[in-house]
Image: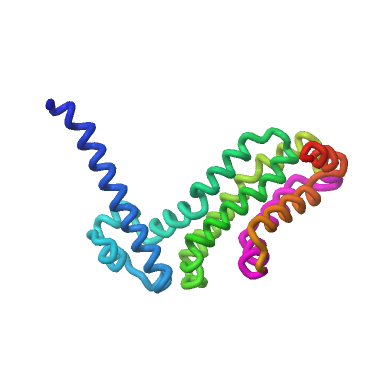
Amino acid sequence: MSEQGKRPYASKLRSRSAEVTRTRVLDAAKELFASQGIDGVTIARIAEKGGVAAATVYSLFKSKEGLLHALMHAALFGPQFREARARLEGVTDPVESIAMSAHVARAIYESESAELGLIRGASAFSPALRKMEQDFERTRFEMQEKRVSLLFAAEKQRKGLQLIEARRILWMYTSRDVYRMLVCDGGWTPDRYQQWLSETLVLTLVNANARQDWAASSD
């Protein structure tokens, strides 16, 4: 076999090996963060548990904050979110798009609760976690802008509602705190949360005529 023929195969092996190493380090970090808290864990300890050199961890993630970011991104924007986002992207009706925000919120928080619940419990006062949450909230607020703008462009917003107010209301209702209070603390099922949130968003943001048209088309 020529050297040219060997290179793609060798490249695939290196890529696969790097992905295995990355996953092993992330698993080690998640377990340690959950049991000892983010601030109580060092890169050296993560490397030891993951069976790699500390230099490898730094090469892959740059810092402990980089590791936390990778864990949060995988939990918040994983398969459930991508599936919900794909469905949302196929929606052309602005009212339905607002209603579908409930599905997106559920996907984010249901996955996060399963993947990061123990880490949050062990690191409630961690400055690093707080910073990541602030970054996530800014991202979430920006991601919702298009949905609200389309509602206003179609003149289907509730009478007297301003665009920036509508964005803040959508952002508030789809927050982690609401999910936590209703599902994690209140005992609601994710299905009940999604249905309630969908109906609440439409009632709060959409004018009466548009709500009636949307309800009729949903029957």
Between 158 and 211, the one lying in front of the other is: 211
Estimate the x, y position of residue 200 in percent, counting from the top left.
Answer: 76, 53
Q: Residue at x 76, y 35 (%)?
A: 153
Q: Would residue 206 be visible to someone looking at this image?
A: yes
Residue placed furthest toward the front: 219
Magenta residues, start to end: 158-186
Which residue appears at 48% of the width and 55% of the height? 75
Q: Which of 187 and 201 is in front in this view?
A: 187
Residue at figure coordinates x 83%, y 45% from the top left: 158
Q: Position of residue 64 (x, y in %)?
A: 37, 61
Indicate yes or no whether the magenta region holds residue 106.
Answer: no
Image height check: is 167 above or below 152? Answer: below
Q: Is residue 96 left or right of residue 89?
A: right
| x then y, percent, for residue 160 | 85, 47
Asked if residue 119 lies left or right of residue 168, the reply is left
Residue 129 location, x and y as percent?
48, 64
Quadrant hosting residue 90: top right
Q: How many marks?
A: 0
Above or below, comparing residue 52 to residue 187 in the picture? above
Dividing the image into 4 quarters, which one contains the N terminus? top left
Residue at position x 29%, y 68% in the image: 45
Question: Does residue 165 show up?
Answer: no
Above or below, 147 against 7 in this view is below
Q: Quadrant of the C terminus?
A: top right
Main secondary-structure element of the magenta-colored stretch: helix
* Residue placed most toward the observer, 186 or 51: 186
According to the image, what is the colour scheme of the structure? rainbow
Question: Residue 166 in magenta?
Answer: yes
